[in-house]
Image (cartoon, rainbow, N blue to C red):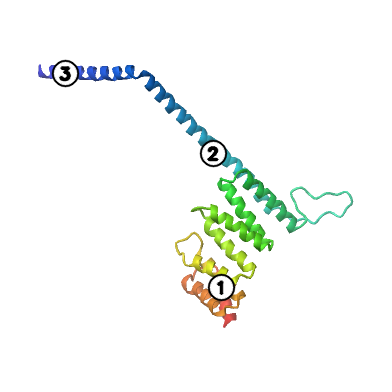
Amino acid sequence: MKAQERHHLKQNEFAATAARVMGTLTANRDRVIMVAIGVVAVAAIVGGYFFWQKRTNEQAGALLGVATSIIQAPIVPAPTVPGATQQPGTYPTEAARREAAVQAFQQVATAYPSTDAGLAARYQIASMHLAGGQFSEAEQAFRAVADSAGKSIYGPMARMGIAQALAGQTKYDDSIKLLTDLSADRDGALPVDGVLMELARVCVKAGKTQEARAAFKRVVDEFPESNYVVEARQRLTVLG
């Protein structure tokens, strides 16, 4: 009997609760409808944003791939036969290929500035300025990448590029300071042995033999398995 009464009471409680909920919904029907519409709208906006973002990243990545392929295009001397044209997908000189690649990467950077592909494109442009001996332009481009890289790998990579561009302009003290800071970050994204080698090379160019020797020695002592060890030992021998 008691079991039946408890069951009956539970049914009554459920019915009362259901009635209160329905009463609240009825009394606030317009508000409930508006909230439901708002939830659906937000879901649609969020879904649309992520779809747009995914599509944008895919388009930017595809365009970046096209630009990257230009860097790897073969160099074929311009045809000397009258009326002949350059073979598609090839470039007559390194300079011509680099110019075409810069234009292609610039297209990515301009069209998709806030994407990872856009950041990668700006880094590639800076690297090509560096490779082409345009050190001032390279420095400016690398600084722009460093400013917008956030916590990505392009931050320290761009700082390394800045140091190399500074060295290209014979601003050795500034380059050495930057490389010294990078070499002190053992938990950073850049391999410390590689940074030390660059530091040592710049020190050699600057005529700072003692500092160069110290950097080469760190590579040998601290990174015995490094691919740079053989070169570091050879440079130490030359420096005496």
The residue tagged with tag 1: helix, strand or loop? helix
Which amino acid type corresponds to the residue marked 3 in the rendered image? Leu
Rounded to the nearest angstrom, the CA distance separating label 3 from label 2 is 54 Å
**Residue furthest to the right:** 82
Q: How crowded is mark 2: few (under 14 residues within 10 Å), some or many (20 or more)?
A: few
Mark 1 residue type: Ala
Viewer-nearest residue: 181 or 120 = 181
Query: In the figure, 32 relative to 134: above or below?
Result: above
Q: Nearer the viewer, residue 89 or 151?
A: 151
Judging by the rendered image, the residue that carries numbered circle 3 is 9
Q: Please state the horizontal and vertical placement of residue 210, each as a whole percent of the image.
A: 54, 80
Q: Position of residue 77 (x, y in %)?
A: 80, 57
Q: Name the residue under label 2.
A: 53
Label 2 to label 1, Cα distance in Å?
A: 43 Å
Point 62% across, 74% down: residue: 205
Q: The C terminus appears in which quarter of the rendering? A: bottom right
Three-letter code, disc 2: Gln
Left or right of 152? Residue 88 is right
**Residue 160, located in which quarter of the rendered image?**
bottom right
Callout 1 crowding tier (Cα within 10 Å): few <14, some 14–19, many ≥20: many
The residue to which callout 1 is attached is: 200
Q: Which of the pair 30/108 is nearer the observer?
A: 30
